[in-house]
Structure formats: structure tokens, C-alpha cells
Amino acid sequence: MSIRLFIAIFALIGLVACTSVRTTSSGAIGLDRKQLMSPFVSEQQLAAGANKAYASVLKQEQSKGALNSDRALTKRVRGIADRIIPQVGAFRPDARGWNWQVNVIESDQLNAWAMPGGKIAFYSGIINKLKLTDAEIAAIMGHEIAHALREHSRERASEAATLQLLVGVGGTLAGIGGNTQAMAQLAYNSTFAMKNSRTHETEADRVGVELMARAGYDPRAAINVWRKMGAATGARSQPEFLSTHPSPETRIADLTRYAALVMPLYQKAPKAPS
């Protein structure tokens, strides 16, 4: 066997042999799934890339006059974040020290997202079109924060990196470790391009209702969000097993169960302003 072939095989085994990690504690909801992460996509690298990607998104929106243009709405969303973010320690204490940022983008899109390291964006359309209450905003925010806490972006990026190497087009992936631009692209892609799995979505729903309950928001509001979303987007056109998201019926049933589970946390928490 040639040295070159040996090195190639060794590199392949090294990347495929992802590490099993536990990104968060189980919380009151009993979350207990371990995740496989590639050694070539670290939490710190992806967070640094997310900083760059997030700054790029904000710059683009600011140039269009769409960044935080509604001051009252921005204040409202940030006020909700100020209640939810301190609760992240229930799942991972280190996340309290993240450089959290929350911004509102003027857009008709029914969307919100969070990048690694606590970079959050809400689109005005999802709030205004669905006429969301503060508790319903909290449900969406808790869901998106959960994706960041669970490092779902890193998990998807690890899967993508492994697949690229396996099919022979990612042989240079080992060289991206110190490349912030490459990590920025990974962070951007894993937020916008790579679809969340049903497992990720369900985890985010469950973690989200616990975060909002601890923050003093009625967790049953999460159920209302998906009813409103279903009414706004219409019935699904394909069976659940072909989708990366749970069906609305499955999602609402699961949220109903977990909202009831975390109700004692909500009852004990200082109530958020209504």
C-alpha cells in the first residue's frame, strides 16, 4: 500500500469516526439523545463562522433599510429574549455566556432562525401576519434557541462533511479547520440550506416549551403557533415520512403532551407581562 493511499484511508476513517457527544443536559423534559459530531467541525469554529455570516446578513438587511426598522417591534422581541435567554442554563450553563444578539428584519416571510452561538433573527412577517402574542413569539424563540443549544447546525454540518468525504469530493475538508470563511459558509448553509430533520424539529419543540415555561410564558401558546401556521400555509401536500418536518397533527399532539409536562415550571415562574 502506498503512503498516499494509507494517508487517504486514515483521513477517511478519522472523519467518518465522528464523536458521540451530549450537547445539553436533559432538562425537565428528559432529553437524552447523544449526537455524532465530526472532529473537523468544532463548536468554536462554527460559532466563529456564524458570527461572520450573521454580520453579513445584518449588513445586507441594513443596506435595504430593513434592519430593526420598527423600533417598537424590535423592543418587544428583545424584551422577550431577555426573559428566555437566562433560562438556557437549564440545558447548558455555558450558553449564558454566549454573545447573544437579537434583531428583527422587515420582511413578509413567515420565518425566524438562530445561528450557532446565539445569533437570532425574527422576520416581521411571522409576527404581524400571524398576529402573534408575546407568548407565541416566546414559543418560536424558544424553538430557535433550542436549535442553537443542541448544536443542530453543527450536527448537520458534520453529516455533510462526512458525506462529502465518503463520495470523494471532500478530500480537502481537513484544511477548513482554521478557515473562518469556510466555517461562515457552513454556518450559513446549515441555518438556511440544510433542512432540519424531524428529530431536530421535535427536540427544538420540546426544549422550546421548557424554556418559555421557565421564562413565565404559558407553554400552551406553542400549540397555538402551529395552529396559526397551519391555517396560514394550508394543508400539507405530502405524507409525513417524506418530509423533514413532523406533520402538523403529530407536532400539535407532541406539544400538547410536553406543554402539560412543563406546566409546573410555568406555574412557579414569575409571569411575563401579558
Image (cartoon, rainbow, N blue to C red):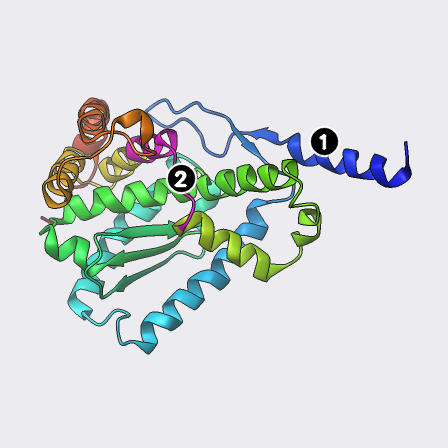
Could you tell me how far apart the alpha carbons at marks 2 and 1 are, in whole angstroms? 35 Å
Q: Residue at x 26, y 56 (%)?
A: 122
In the picture, measured across the screen, residue 7 lies left or right of residue 216, that is right
Secondary structure of the residue carrying tag 2 is: helix
The quadrant where residue 12 appears: top right
Amino acid residing under circle 2: Gly
Q: Is residue 124 above or below residue 17?
A: below
Numbered mark located on residue 89 in the image: 2
By secondary structure, the bulk of the magenta-drawn segment is best described as: helix
Residue 141, x across and y down, in percent: 27, 47
Q: Nearer the viewer, residue 269 or 26?
A: 26
The quadrant where residue 38 appears: top right
Q: Is residue 169 above or below residue 254?
A: below
- Asked if residue 98 shows in the view, the reply is no
Q: Is residue 204 magenta?
A: yes
Report the quarter where the N terminus lies. Answer: top right
Few, some or many residues within 10 Å of mark 1 (<14, 14–19, 20+): some
Mark closest to the chain's N terminus, 2 or 1? 1
The quadrant where residue 146 appears: top left
Q: Which residues are magenta?
A: 193-206
- Asked if residue 132 shows in the view, the reply is yes
Amino acid residing under circle 1: Ile
Q: Is residue 205 magenta?
A: yes
Secondary structure of the residue carrying tag 1 is: helix
Q: Is residue 55 above or below residue 78?
A: below
Residue 249, x across and y down, in percent: 17, 26
Residue at which label 1 appears? 13
Residue 126, x across and y down, in percent: 18, 53
Q: Residue at x 27, y 30 (%)?
A: 246
